[in-house]
Image (tube, rainbow, N blue to C red):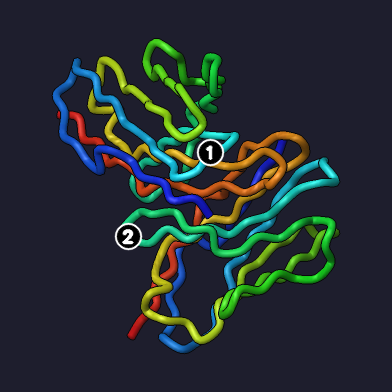
Amino acid sequence: SAVISQKPSRDICQRGTSLTIQCQVDSQVTMMFWYRQQPGQSLTLIATANQGSEATYESGFVIDKFPISRPNLTFSTLTVSNMSPEDSSIYLCSVGTSGRYEQYFGPGTRLTVT
Amino acid sequence: AQTVTQSQPEMSVQEAETVTLSCTYDTSENNYYLFWYKQPPSRQMILVIRQEAYKQQNATENRFSVNFQKAAKSFSLKISDSQLGDTAMYFCAFIAGRDDKIIFGKGTRLHILP
């Protein structure tokens, strides 16, 4: 399995500001995903980060609010823009290899918006 | 619609006991993969066990095993000789067809009591 790191591990931000979360993998992977998880709840997929093209967003998530970059096969960023307290959550990235049908997760970023 | 149902929101068992977590799923695909993920309080999502739907033999990983009943669309997780470190939220999930997106259940919070 891949070793995945996320930065920052946690942050407290003021409303109206933006935070960029980084996801780094120790090997090249085909698939990278971004999830949001409210405390004690299941995971909600935000988008699939595509290398070399725009991310594919799930219903209810838009690029202006959650811009995503994926410059190469080992790195991706998720920005949470113009934050409000409703954005307080855990954000996780996951990686997978097309055809292997399994995903591995980063340690998550706990975001609190005040 | 593809769904995963975990009917036990929370469970508690004594250390060293055996516990079974229930999961049912729904998909019209014939080719899919089933997973159990563990998320301890540290929030790192860990892949516990994986089952390919085309395999009749139930997957096992040390103290963790599954009971896969394809016709009933059931995929339960058995933890033998439970340990305090097994305390976590457990998510049942699957990937179906050609899509690499994971569908998660709502999770079962498992407490192992000393």
Residue at 39% over, 77% down: B112
Q: Position of residue A50 (x, y in %)?
A: 55, 23
Residue at 20% over, 30% down: A113
In the depicted view, which residue is nearer to us: A48 or B90? A48
Q: Name the residue under label 1.
A: A28
Q: What element carries label 1?
A: loop
Q: Where is residue B26 in the image (x, y as percent from the top left)?
A: 74, 46
Chain letter of the residue carrying label 1: A
Tell me if B52 is positioned left or right of A88 in this view: right
Chain letter of the residue carrying label 2: B
Q: Quadrant of the C terminus of chain A?
A: top left
Q: Is mark 2 on a helix, strand or loop?
A: loop
Q: Which amino acid does label 2 sit on?
A: Pro
Q: Where is residue A32 in the image (x, y as percent from the top left)?
A: 52, 34
Q: What residue type is labelled 1?
A: Gln
Q: Mark 2 points at which residue?
A: B41
Q: Position of residue B108 (x, y in %)?
A: 49, 60
Determine the residue located farthest toward the top in the rendered image.
A64
